[in-house]
């Protein structure tokens, strides 16, 4: 089992920045880690992911303002979010896929991000 704990959410004004962090435990290595979000009344959507080898993938609408990074030794993954907009308001979830040859994923509890003046 993999446990994921997110941190860094909060209230930010439009145009501001936030950095989310996720710490994983329960395994010595994780193939892929990523971030999703879910706004009220909407489906959970993919933001970005990064493999243990450093390969990143972003949703088309996210790459210009969001940057994902990870520390393999610490099993952490961060999401730097810049120029935040009210429509970025959502619960942000950390996601981990421990094994390359197994599609099973684990989820964190989520952290709330609210963009409002």
Image (tube, grey):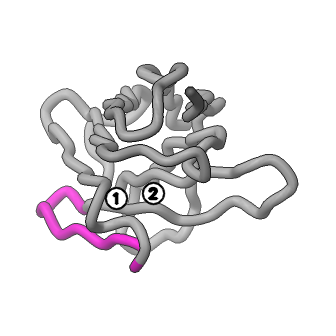
> Considering the numbered disc 1 on the image, is that residue within a helix, a strand or a loop?
strand
- What residue did someone put label 2 on? 97
Decide which of 116, 56 is in the foreground and name it: 116
Count of numbered marks: 2
- Mark 2 or 1 closer to N-term? 1
Point out residue 72 in the picture as x, y percentages from the top left corner. Answer: 16, 41
Find out whether residue 59 is within the magenta segment. yes
Discs 2, 1 touching: Cβ within 8 Å? yes
- Report the side of 109 relative to 113 (left or right): right
Tell me the residue at 59%/31% (across/down).
116
Looking at the image, the residue that sits furthest to the front is 117
- Tell me how far mark 2 sits from mark 1, CA to CA: 5 Å
Point out residue 115 in the picture as x, y percentages from the top left corner. Answer: 55, 34
> Considering the numbered disc 2 on the image, is that residue within a helix, a strand or a loop?
strand
Decide which of 85, 49 is in the foreground and name it: 85
Against 3, residue 57 (above or below) is below
Decide which of 69, 100 is in the foreground and name it: 69
Identify the disc placed on residue 61: none
Q: Residues within 10 Å of mark 2 (few under 14, many from 20)?
A: some
- What residue did someone put label 1 on? 32
Magenta-tinted stretch: 51-60
Looking at the image, the residue that sits furthest to the right is 41
Q: Residues within 10 Å of mark 1 (few under 14, many from 20)?
A: many
Tell me the residue at 27%/66% (across/down).
64
Assign the C terminus to one quadrant of the image: top right
């Amino acid at each position: 089992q993999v446990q994921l704990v997110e941190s860094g959410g909060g209230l930010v004004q439009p145009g501001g920045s936030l950095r989310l962090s996720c710490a994983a435990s329960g395994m010595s290595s994780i193939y892929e880690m990523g971030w999703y979000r879910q706004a009220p009344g909407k489906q959970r959507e993919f933001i970005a992911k990064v493999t243990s080898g450093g390969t990143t993938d972003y949703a088309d609408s996210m790459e210009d303002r969001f940057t994902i990074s990870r520390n393999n030794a610490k099993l952490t993954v961060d999401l730097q979010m810049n120029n935040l907009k009210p429509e970025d308001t959502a619960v942000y979830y950390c996601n981990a896929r421990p094994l390359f040859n197994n599609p099973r994923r684990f989820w964190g509890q989520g952290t709330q991000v609210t963009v409002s003046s």
